[in-house]
Amino acid sequence: MQPEVETLVWLVAIGVVVALVAYWLLRLVAARITHRVALIAERQIGAALAPGVSRVPRGSSRRPVVSGDVRARRLAELDKLAWLMDRVIPVPIIGGVGLDAVLGLFPVAGDVASLIISSVLIVRAAQLGAPPQLISRLIAIQIIDLLLGVVPVIGDLADAGYHANERSVALLREWMRDAPG
């Protein structure tokens, strides 16, 4: 091999490695920024939907309307739905993407379809007897996911990193753990 060709091969290899590292770092930074902005927006939207409430109170006085077995089964179903919507396709580094991100590739219609599927979480939470503050927080999470998703290209990346359904199930699980009865 000639020295010029060998040098060119090394430069291309180094360029590819640098580009991959830069892509990974940019994606990490974008995910952190998206996460922080979404948390702020989530709190503000939740407060607007339920004035005077900034977070779901621990030990809410409202009791679930279903038995423990049914609650556990419904929570398992919601875990599967969240996994399907947020992490069904394993992707190295970011953990995975789900149906939400795939549907987001179809402008607006895909994001609306994702919202409709994800609304099952909100309906189930209401059926389980979740307090209005928690329901408003779940609605806020889904609205933020919709608003992030409709932004071309950036919205698709945000959809892959925001994992709205997993956030909703985690809040519901926390409430069920802390709820009396």
Image: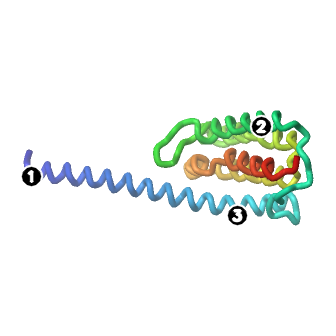
Residue under label 1, please give it.
Answer: 3
C-alpha span from label 3 to label 2: 31 Å
Q: Residue furthest left?
A: 2
Res. 96 image quadrant? top right
Q: Secondary structure at mark 1?
A: helix
Residue under label 3, please give it.
Answer: 40
- Is residue 41 among the parts visible in the rendering? yes
Q: Are marks 1 and 3 in contact (CB under 8 Å)?
A: no
Mark 2 neighbour density, 10 Å: few (under 14) some (14–19) many (20 or more): some
Choose the circle earlier in sequence order: 3 or 2: 3
- Quarter holding the N terminus is top left
Residue under label 2, please give it.
Answer: 72
Q: Nearer the viewer, residue 155 or 172?
A: 172
Q: Position of residue 18 (x, y in %)?
A: 33, 56
C-alpha span from label 1 to label 3: 55 Å
Q: Secondary structure at mark 3?
A: helix
Q: Residue at x 69, y 39 (%)?
A: 79
Q: Residue at x 46, y 44 (%)?
A: 92
Mark 1 neighbour density, 10 Å: few (under 14) some (14–19) many (20 or more): few
Q: Position of residue 2 (x, y in %)?
A: 8, 48
Mark 3 neighbour density, 10 Å: few (under 14) some (14–19) many (20 or more): few
Q: Position of residue 10 (x, y in %)?
A: 20, 52
